[in-house]
Image (cartoon, grey):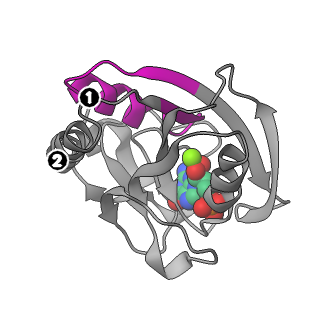
C-alpha cells in the first residue's frame, strides 16, 4: 500500500516503509547484542505498538516472550492527560525478568513515565524502552529510551500502528493527516 491508495486524507509521508525497515534492523541488532544470553520479556502497549512488536520481535535472533498491556491516558482531547488507567494488565509475573517495553510513539512521555514506574514496582531485573517514534518538542516527562527509531516533528501522525479514530493503523508508513480529516 502507498500514499496513492489512501487518497487525499494524507498530507505527507514522514517515514517510508523502507526507512522503518532499516531502523527495525538496527534496533533488533542492538537488542540482540545487549540481551545475548539473557531472558527477555517484550511488553507491547496496545494497540499502537502491534506493528513494531511484530516486526521487531521477528528480527531478533534469540527467543523472547511477549505480553501486552492496554492503558488509557487521554483526557477529553487528543493529548495525554498524564492520568493513566490500566485497561488490560500483563499476565506475566515480572519478578527477576528483563522487561523491554515496546511502543509506537512517545509524545508527552507521560504515559511511559508512569508505565516504567509501575512496572519497576513489580520486582523486575530491568525495565527498558524501545519506541519507533518520539516527538522531542512535545516532551513533558523525562523518559529514557534505550532503543529509538526516529525523532519526528510535533505533529499528529498515523500509520504503522497509529490511528485516527481507529483508521490508518495498517498503513506500512508514517504520515501526517490532511487538515480536512480532523476539521482543521
Ligand atoms: N495516532 C497517534 N497517536 C499518538 C500520537 N502521539 C501520541 N499518541 C498516542 O499517545 C500515546 C502516548 O502519549 P504520551 O503523550 O503519553 O507520550 C502513544 O502511545 C500513542 O498511542 C500521534 O501523533 N498519533
Ligand atoms: Mg502507544
Asked whether, in this view, residue 95 is left or right of residue 22, the answer is right
Q: Quadrant of the C terminus?
A: bottom right
Instruction: Give the residue displayed 71% in from the left and 39% down from the top.
Output: 122
SS assignment at label 2: helix
Q: Residue furthest bottom?
A: 137
Where does residue 90 sit, x and y in percent of width and height? 68, 26
Residue that mark 2 sits on: 26
Note whether ligand 2 is within 8 Å of mark 1: no
Membership of 86 in magenta stretch = no
Estimate how packed mark 2 is, as few (under 14), some (14 to 19) or many (20 or more) residues with alpha carbons within 10 Å: some
Residue 180: image x %, image y %? 56, 61
Between 164 and 130, the one nearer to me in the picture: 130
Q: Position of residue 66 (x, y in %)?
A: 49, 22
Instruction: Name the quarter showing ligand 1.
Output: bottom right
User: Does 60 appear in magenta?
Assistant: yes
Looking at marks 2 and 1 on the same chain, the residue that comes earlier in the sequence is marked by 2
Residue identified by numbered label 1: 37
Q: Which residues are magenta?
A: 42-67
Amino acid at each position: 500500500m502507498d500514499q496513492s491508495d489512501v487518497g487525499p486524507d494524507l498530507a505527507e509521508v514522514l517515514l517510508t516503509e523502507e526507512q522503518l525497515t532499516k531502523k527495525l534492523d538496527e534496533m533488533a541488532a542492538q537488542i540482540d547484542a545487549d540481551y545475548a544470553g539473557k531472558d527477555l520479556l517484550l511488553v507491547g502497549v496496545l494497540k499502537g505498538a502491534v506493528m513494531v512488536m511484530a516486526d521487531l520481535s521477528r528480527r531478533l535472533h534469540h527467543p523472547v516472550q511477549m505480553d501486552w498491556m492496554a492503558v488509557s491516558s487521554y483526557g477529553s482531547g487528543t493529548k495525554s492527560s498524564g492520568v493513566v488507567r490500566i485497561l488490560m494488565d500483563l499476565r506475566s509475573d515480572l519478578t527477576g525478568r528483563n522487561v523491554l517495553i515496546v511502543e509506537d510513539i512517545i509524545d508527552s512521555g507521560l504515559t511511559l513515565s508512569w508505565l516504567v514506574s509501575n512496572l519497576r514496582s513489580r520486582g523486575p531485573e530491568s525495565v527498558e524502552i524501545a519506541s519507533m517514534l518520539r516527538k522531542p518538542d512535545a516532551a513533558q516527562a523525562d523518559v529514557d529510551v534505550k532503543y529509538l527509531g526516529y525523532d519526528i516533528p510535533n505533529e499528529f501522525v498515523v500509520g504503522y500502528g497509529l490511528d485516527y479514530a481507529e483508521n490508518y493503523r495498517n498503513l506500512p508508513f508514517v504520515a501526517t493527516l490532511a487538515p480536512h480529516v480532523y476539521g482543521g
